[in-house]
Amino acid sequence: MMENTVCKPFVSPAEKPLRVAILGSTGSVGTQAIDSLSTLGCRIVLLAAGRDAKTVAEQARLYHPEICTMNDENAAAELRLALAGQDVRVYGGADAVCRGIEECGADLILHSIAGLAGLPAAIAAAKTGARIGMANKEAIIVAGDWIYDALRQSG
């Protein structure tokens, strides 16, 4: 297990809006987090979901993320159509969320992808050096040592 370290303050350097990635943006944790974080003035830079392109499109129109990812390729195609003409990159497929995590430059990654399906995203998030809010116990139980090693290596 990772030793407890001094927590960094929940603000971004130079008073810039905190850049936040929401993994599992259409679930109950994700939707509540988006509402709360946007109210606090955070900048939502990544929305990641599985198949619910309609909800992600609505979220993207409200919060203007830089990247949206869909685990399902058909849902990604639907989302691309729904967001045509908007300045947002849409990735689809099994590795889309990891690509989005790597590219978005988030200060904070809120991980609420359910079950072991969220494991690759947890490891990708840990490698970024961003703070992570984990709402996924399965990934920690199964691969906590890998996740904590990646966190230590990324600082």
Image: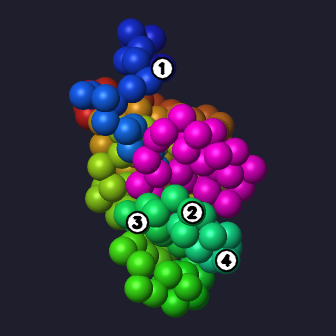
Question: At which x and y percent is residue 13?
Answer: 27, 28
Camera-side mark, 2 or 4: 2
Is residue 55 positioned above or below 34 on the image? below
Any magenta on residue 41?
yes
Q: Earlier in the sequence, mark 1 or mark 2?
A: 1
Evaluate if marks 3 and 4 touch, with contact meaning CB atoms under 8 Å apart.
no
Quadrant in which the C terminus is drawn: top left
Range of magenta residues? 22-47
Camera-side mark, 1 or 2: 2
Q: Secondary structure at mark 4?
A: helix
The structure residue drawn at horizontal position 30% and vertical position 43%, both measured from the top left corner, is 128
Question: At which x and y percent is residue 21?
Answer: 46, 50
Q: Earlier in the sequence, mark 1 or mark 3?
A: 1
- Three-letter amino acid code of the residue under disc 1: Met
Q: Which residue is mark 2?
A: 62
Q: Secondary structure at mark 1?
A: loop
Q: Earlier in the sequence, mark 1 or mark 4?
A: 1
**Picture disc at residue 1:** 1
